[in-house]
Structure formats: C-alpha cells, structure tokens
Amino acid sequence: MLSVVIILATTLSSVKAMTVATSSMMASTTSMKTMERVFARSEQVHSQSLATIMRSMSPRKALQVLEKRNLTSPALVQLTSHLHGKQSNLRKKQPSGYAGIDGARKLLNDMIYESMGKYDSEIARCSEYYSAQCAAMDECRGQISASNYIAANSRSMILDSQATINKCEQDIPTRKYRLKQHLLMCKHELSKMRSRLAVIEADISILTTILQMTDCKALLQTKVSLLHCDNSCSKTSFITFDHDDLKEKISHLQSSVTQGLLKDNFKDLAAGIAGLQSLDFFQLNSKQTPVANTTYFSNPPLPRTEVPQNPCEDPSLTPTMTNKNANKCTIAASPHCDQLQERFLLIQSGVEDERDNLLGEIQMLEHYRDETKGTLEAEIQNDQNMLQEAQTKLADATTKEADAGEKARQTAKEHDELNNDLKSQMKTCSSNYINFETEMCALKKIRGELYKMSSQTAFFQDCVVAKWDPEECSSECGGGQQTLSRAIITHPNGGAKCLPLTAVKTCNAQPCPVDCKLEEWQGWSKCSAQCGGGVQQRLRNVERAMRFEGKPCDATSETRACNAHACEKECELSRWSEWSQCSKVCDGGTQKRMKFVKQEPVGQGSCPDMWSPKRLEYKECNKFSCFDPQSHQCTTHNIDTNLYTCQTLPPCCEGFLGMGKTEATVQCLPESMATNTQYTVKCPAKPLQCKEELDIVFLLDGSGSLGDRGWEAEKKAATTFVDAFTGTGAQAHMAVILYSGPKYWSGVYKCMGKQKGEVNLETDCKIKTVTHLTADMAAVKTAITGLEYPKGSTLTSLALTSAKAELNLGRKDAKSIVVVITDGRPMSYRKTYWAARDLRKVARLVWVPVTRYAPLRKIKKWATRRWKENVVRVKTFDDLEKADVVNHVVANICPKK
C-alpha cells in the first residue's frame, strides 16, 4: 500500500506541478504561444517527464497505476501475481501461456503500444483542438473588431445626420417666413398697382369719350371755346372749356398722370397766365369747408349781425356763361379742331403708355413673385427632403450601431467562453499527457521487473519514431488538410512495435482574410456656412468591415470647402485701358478708355455696369470746327467804285460759289486808295462732304405741331443733308421716310391699337416711304423738295419700325444709319422706346430734336450710346436751316473728311 501511495503521490505531484505551472503561466501571460507549447507537447518535455516518472516508479506503484486506470486483465493479474511473494516459483517452474515469459512480454508490449498510441492520439487531438479553438477565437476577435468599426462608422453617420437635421430645422422655418413675407409684400404691391390700373383704365374710357366729343364732325354743330379765368378769391388763374359736357368728363379724370398730361399738352395755350395751378388745372368744382372756431361767453350775447356769405366758398360758382365775368374769364384764341383732337390724342396715348408700363410692372412683379416663390419653395422642399433623408439615415445608423454593438457583445461573450474552454481543455490535455506517460512507465516497469525475477537476461528496445514531418497544407486559411509522415529512428527489438507512420490533420484553421467593402458615397451635406468659408461632408457606410488582416477600409468620410467666397466682396476691375482714337476728326469728338471685370462680385457685393464712370471714361478731343470761317488777305482787281463790289474772291470761296451760293462777305475800299489795296474776306461755311460707305434712312417729321414754318425749315435741312453725300467719290445710299399719323383718334387706334385686319401704312397711318435706298442723291433731293406737309399726328414708333424694314434692303458691308428729325413728343413714349431699342440692334440711331417741346430727356435714352454724339439739339427752326446743324450730324456719322 505504501508503494501505491508513493506512486499516486508522485503522479499527483507531477500533475499538480504541471497544473500550477500552467496556471502560473496563464496568470502571468495568456499569450497563445504559451498555450501552444502546452498543447503541442514536445519530445524533450515528453522524455523528461518519462524519466522523472521512471525514477520514482516501483513495481507496486506500477501495479497501482494500472489498477487505477483499469488496465488489469486476467492475464495481467495472473502474471503480476508472481510479483507478490511468489518470485521463487518463477525460477523453479515457468507458467505456460500468458504466464510464460514470452507471453508476458508480448502482452506487455501490446499494452505499451496501445498506451503509446493513446498518448500520440491525445497529442494530435489536443493540438488540433488548440488550432481550431484559436481559429474560432481569432474569428471572434475579428468579428468584434469589425463590429466596433461598423459601430464607429454608424456613429459618424448619426452625428452627420443630427447635424443635417439641426441645420434643416433652422433653415425651413426661416425660409417659410421669408416666403410668407414675400407673398404678402407682392400681394400688397399688386393690389396697389391694380387699383392704379383700374383708375387709369377708367380715365382711358373717359378720354375715348372725350375724343369722340372733340371729333371735328361732332364739333361742327357745337363750338368749343377755351376760357382763361382769374379767380378773384384765390388770386389764381386757370383754363377751362366753354362746354359743359366736356368739362364734366374732364372733371371725372382721376389719375395724377392724366392731370399732368392735361397740363403739359395745354401749357402752350396757357402761356402768359400768372399763377396757373397744376392740381386744379381743369377742376373747378372743388369745395372748401372752412374751419369755424366757437367761443362761449358767460354774459348774455348781444344782438347778432349776419355775416354775408363769401362768394368764394360757393360751390356752385363755376365759370359758366353767366358767371364767367365774375371770375374774369376771357375767351382765348381757341385751338382749331385738329389741334384740339391732336392734344387729346397725345393725352390718351400718354395715359395708355402709363397703362402699358403699369401692366409691364405688374407682369414683372408677378414674374418676380412666382420666380422667388418657386425658388423658396424649391429650397424648402430640398430642405424637407434632406431632413427626411437625414432622419431615415439617423434611424438606419442608430439601428446599425445598436446591431453592431450587440453583435460585438455577443461575440465577446462567445470569445470568453472559448477562452475559458481552452484553458480548461489545456488542463485536461496536460493531465492526460501525464497519465499516459505514467501508464507507459508502469507497463515498462512491470515488463522489466518480470524479466528480472525470471533470472533471464533480456534486452527490450521499443520502436522509436521521428517527429512528424508535415506536407504542404491544402489551404492557406480557413481549415485545410495536411498529411503527416514520420520515419523510424529505431526499430523494435523485443519491445513495442512502431506507431503509424502517416496521419492526416487539419491545418491553417485560422480564418481567411476578409477585405473591407464599402458602399457608394452618399450626397454632400449642406454647407456649414452661406459664405465666408464653410465645410461640406459626405460619408459612406461600411458594408463589410476588414477582418483577419484583410485589406483595410479606405476613407469613409470626405470633406471639402464650400462657399469660400467672401460674404460681401465687390468685383475686381482691371486697370484702365489705353485711350482710344478720337471718334471724330473735327467738331468735338471723344476718346474713351475702359476697365474690364477681372473677378465677378461675391455675395451681396456690387459691380459697376459697363456704362458706369467707374468703368468707362471719356475725354474730349478735336474740338475745332470742321469749317471755321477763315480770314484771308486778298488783292483787289477790277473794282467798281460806284457799287463797291469785288469781282474776284479768294480761292476758299470758289467751291461754295460753285454750288450756287453768293454769301461771301467782302470788304472793298473806295477808288481813292491805291491799286492792289489789301482787304479781308471771310469765307462762308459749306456742308461737310462724306465719302463713307453708308446706308442712311432719313426720317422727316410731318406732324401738325411743326407748322408751315417748321416744315419748310425741315425740308431745307433735309436737302442740305443730301448735299453732304453728293459729289465725287460718294458711297452712300439713302432712303427717306415721311412720318406723321392720322389726325383723329379712330385712325390712330387703327394703326396702334389691337384691331385685326390689314392696315396700309401710307394711307391709314401716314407713314410714307418717299424713296427707297438709292445712290441717286439728285432724285432724293427732288423727292424731298416735292413733299407736301401732311399735318398729322406723330407715330414715331411706326416710322422707326419702317426704317428697320428698309435697312433689310441695304448692303451687307455698309454701315446702317437712321437720322430722325422731330419737334415734339411722339404719340406713344413706350412704343417709341421699344421700337428704338429694337432698331439700335441693327443700326446707329441719330436724333435731331428741334424746339424746347421735344422730349430731350427721353430722346437721349432712345439714341444710340453715347448720346452726346448721336443727339444734335436745335433750339429753333431758324437754326435748323443753317448748315452747321447738318455739319454736326455728318461729323457724327462720318468722321472722315
């Protein structure tokens, strides 16, 4: 029993030592390499363990080990019974069968072989278990790392979605408020405009009735007189008509525009009237209510005397035939029927212009309202879509983060279980290693003791094999198969036979590398700032995280700068260019220099337009006259002393006289002076000749406002203009259009209204093409001379349209010029503006406004830029006849002499 106790104690101490060592090793370092050394027991450790066990092994201990491990078969019991007090019988007589020495050796060798096989299998099993367990733990760690990475990526998505949601929740209410305010403002403005439009349309209706009343056929039976009145009460003057129905209609006109046009169109008739009221120009029925202050006294009132009524406060006191003398009204030189009709036509066309302008403003405001509304609604919808998308992303990212976190937690739990199982199995394998080694030692001890007691000399050599030699694994990862082989180092000699020399084991059980896989980029987030530099970000989800040393993920987020422009930055202009050549060789031209936009304005920054003085500068040049009168010293010949006339003139006047002019002024001296006396001659100015290749359309105003004097002056200026293109080398083609218009409102409405049907420009609208483009200047001059004064209205817009149509017949390489002479306002400012703007796209438009009634301010806008070189202002019709006017026009359009 003592021997068994010793054996058990030794075995337990060895197991305990291994367990303590293993526990200490695991406690100090839990590295997988340390565990691997325990599971894959080396041959050196195996040999050392066997030697240690054999030193303490006795026959009794060996038997106890075998009995404990249930390895005692009947044959082995019969054999080992001789080891207990019956050793002498072994020497006397040997037992037969398994009791014999040879049978005992064979039995023990088989048991040793079986024990060695179990040890070998345990080594293989534990090693393969370790490999599989480590692979499973690697996979867990990889899964945990991937889950953490996905959770971190999901957290980025969550933060980005939250930032987008916060931005949208701020922007959407702001834009909705802006939209509400914008619609309210537009509604208010449109309401005011439509109210004005209703008033203007009412005035147009009244003016149409007035035009019918002032039609010459209607006025044949009723005479209309214009009254000049002085109000003795208000000390003011006004004008009105001696026609009750007409006065009543005029009193119903409400628009301030209509009132202003009434004053403007009749102010020439009111010349010399002092204190003319503009607001009460035709309104004589205004009622004034005096303010009465009452004072109460405590003493009884004295007898009261009635105060006579102030006649100035009588609302019935209006200038009629019975009371006009009281107001000192006199009958002025009443206008003719056609003049009265023309004035009301101008008033109505002016009001219609205002209506058309107002309709255009309403249309523009509606377009602005709808456009801005659409923009704001689109921005709101984009923000709402972005908000909805961000909320969806937030929900998805939150779910993904939660799933990834839960998966990591479960995987970590699994990893801990695997790790605990590995540690437990490590202890089991270590114990089994020692048990099998103890078993082998016990069997070998019994075998040796058996031969010692038989007094036989025997040598036992068990088979010794080399270490396993592995072949290449069938797979680099994920678990392959590997064939093992080993060689025999020492063949058996009376000992246990050799273990199997080949085996198959699992290899490379570690998981295969898994590359990262990313989804497509999401859209860019909203810029963090509207200006001044913001940041946009875009993210992409991780579809599959990297594991087991696979290819790592590329960047999952990108940022870029946005709205880097300054919130307020003016445009950047270039330096001034060089001064251009002078636009004219004489008569005062200009040179210009410009700045160009190098960088557009940013945000609310502004930039001067191309016509601003900040970008365009002019300076005058060649300010001398093209034909200054020159002084010459000439010698007299053949002087007629009686008439004091000169028969010979300086050469400078020859060309002028050759054109039939005899206006040279010559100072001659009496006969008492010596011969060859010196005298001074001033040569008169002559028209400037132009040899440029031009296509010119000349527009002559034939409106009734010209008068006979103005018409003749205009014809003379036109013929002088034609002379400027007559002569050797002239390359100009010229067309002449005479424009006026119908005298009465029905004809004007037919030409400028919205009536359908054919309209003859010449017969219906008085737009007559005198000559088409031709190089025969003599024929042009003859045609102008033979023109008759039409005395109509002023349809300037139709004349400009006709001029554009005429230029379509012009030459391809010739410059297109349109010259317009006018003395007053056109029938429609608005239509004239649009016609001039359209004409300026194909030709240079030059204006010659005559008299102070011409709308110079508007003409400057109608003329081609720069207006200073395309508007030649003439004060009177007498000035229009002078050659200087034509010279100015020719110098503008034909800069070469």
Image (cartoon, grey):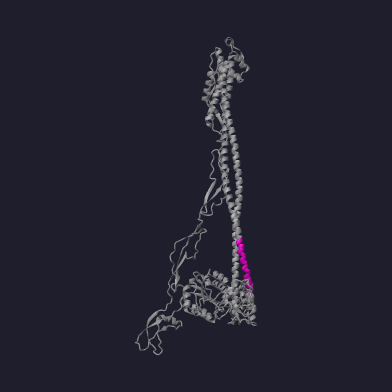
421 to 773, vertically: above or below: above
Give the image location of residue 502, x and y in percent.
Answer: 56, 27
Number of on-image labels = 0
User: Which quarter of the image is occupied by the C terminus?
Assistant: bottom left
Is residue 573 one of those drawn in magenta?
no
Pick the front one: 143 or 779: 143
Give the image location of residue 144, x and y in percent.
Answer: 57, 38
124 to 863, vertically: above or below: above
Q: Is residue 185 something that shows in the picture?
A: yes
Residue that extends furthest to the bottom in the rendered view of this protein: 642
Q: What residue appears at the point 53 percent right and 49 percent down from the top-left corner?
A: 559
Q: Which residues are magenta?
A: 184-207
84 to 331, vertically: above or below: above
Is residue 206 one of those drawn in magenta?
yes
* Quadrant of the image occupied by residue 652: bottom left
Pick the front one: 465 or 765: 765
Q: What predominant SS class does the magenta segment belong to?
A: helix
Residue that extends furthest to the front in the rendered view of this protein: 299
Pick the front one: 153 or 224: 224
Pick the front one: 63 or 478: 63
* Quadrant of the image occupied by residue 545: top right
* Quadrant of the image occupied by residue 580: bottom left
Give the image location of residue 794, x and y in percent.
Answer: 57, 76
Residue that extends furthest to the left in the rendered view of this protein: 674
Give the image location of residue 532, x and y in percent.
Answer: 51, 54
Q: Is residue 489 something that shows in the picture?
A: no
88 to 557, vertically: above or below: above
User: Which quarter of the image is occupied by the N terminus?
Assistant: top right
